[in-house]
Amino acid sequence: MTRNAVKAKEEAAKQNTDKSLARRDLFRVAGLGVGALGAVAAGVTATGGTAEAAPAETVSTGYRETDHVRRVYELSRF
Amino acid sequence: MSKAVDHTVPPAVAEEELLRAQVYGLLARLLSRAPDADFLAALAGMAGEGGEFGAALNQLAEAARGCDPAAVVEEFTTLFIGVGGSERTPYGSYYLTGFLNEKPLAELRVDMARLGIARADGVREPEDHIAALCEMMAGLIGGEFAPEDGGIVDLEAQRAFFDRHVGSWAGRFFADLETSPSARFYRAVGAVGRSFLAVEARAFDLAA
C-alpha cells in the first residue's frame, strides 16, 4: 500500500469515527441514555431472534419467558 | 439490565445502537398488545434522560403509574381492534395509500425476503403493522437476520428500510395516536414513538 493510500484510509476511518461520535452525541442529547428504559429494556429485546413480529400474537412462549426472565433480573438486583 | 440483553444482541453492536433496538422493541411490544400489570409496573420505573424523547418517556412512565390494566386492555381494543372498525389503522399500506394490503405491503415483502426476515408461523396479520415493523427494525439493528446476499445489515441498509417502510408514515401514525379521542395511556405511547422516530431520522442523516 502506498503512503497516500494509507493516508486516505486513515482519513476515511477518522471520518467514520467522527460520524459515529456525532451520532452517539445526538442520541445522548435526545435523551436516549443508557439507563432510560430501566427494567423495561431487558423485557423488550429478548423477543426477536426466531422470526419477525407477530402483532396479533397473544400466546407466545418467547414473550412469556421474557417476562419471567425480566422478573428474575429485577429480583436479583437486591 | 445489560446482562439480560447480552444474550440476544451480539456484543459488536454499540451501546447507542442497542438502545435504539430496545426502544423499537418497547414500541413493538406496546403496539402488539396491551401491557399487563407487570409490564406497567416496569414502565412506571422508567426515567427519561432529557430531550423531547426523555420527556415523552417520563410521560409514559407517569401514565403507566396511574392506570388500571383492565382499562388499558379496553383502550387497546377500541384503538386498534374495535368492533366495526378501530379508531386507528396501524398499517403502512393504509397510511400510504388509504387502503390495506396495497403496493407498499408488496414492496415490504420483497425487502423482507431480501433481508432474510420471515414471518412468524401462524401469524395472519399483514407484515406492515407498526409493531411488526418496529420489531424488524430492532432485529436489523441487532443483526438478527441473515440477508440473502450473505452481507451484513449496516446503517445504510437500516436507513433504506426505515425511509421506505417506517419513516414514510409511522410519524403520522404516532401523531394521530397522540390525539386519538379514546387514547389515554396510548397518547403517551404516541409521544414516545413520534419523538423517537424524529431522533432516528436525524441520526440517519448524520451517518449519511
Image (cartoon, rainbow, N blue to C red):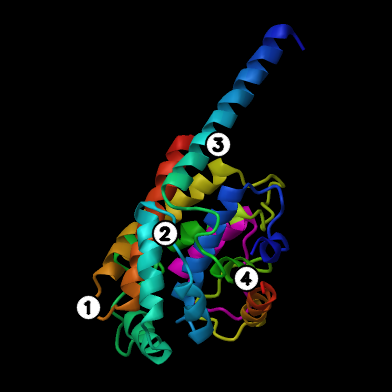
- Classify residue B83 as left or right of residue B111: left
Residue A34 is covered by the magenta coloring:
no
Q: Depth-wise, is mark 3 or mark 2 nearer the camera?
A: 3
Q: Residues within 10 Å of mark 3 (few under 14, many from 20)?
A: some
Region in magenta: B111-139
How far across and down, in percent of the image, does residue A72 sit? 68, 78
The residue identified by callout 3 is: A20
Q: Residues within 10 Å of mark 2 (few under 14, many from 20)?
A: many
Q: Are marks 1 and 2 in contact (CB under 8 Å)?
A: no
* Any part of residue B39 in sight: yes
How much space separates mark 3 and mark 1, taking CA atoms? 40 Å
Of residue B111 and residue B139, the one placed in the foreground of this image is: B139
Are tags 4 and 3 found on a single chain? yes
User: Which residue sits at x=65%, y=57%?
Assistant: B116
**Helix, strand or loop under label 1:** loop
Q: Depth-wise, is mark 2 or mark 4 nearer the camera?
A: 4
Q: Amino acid at mark 2?
A: Pro
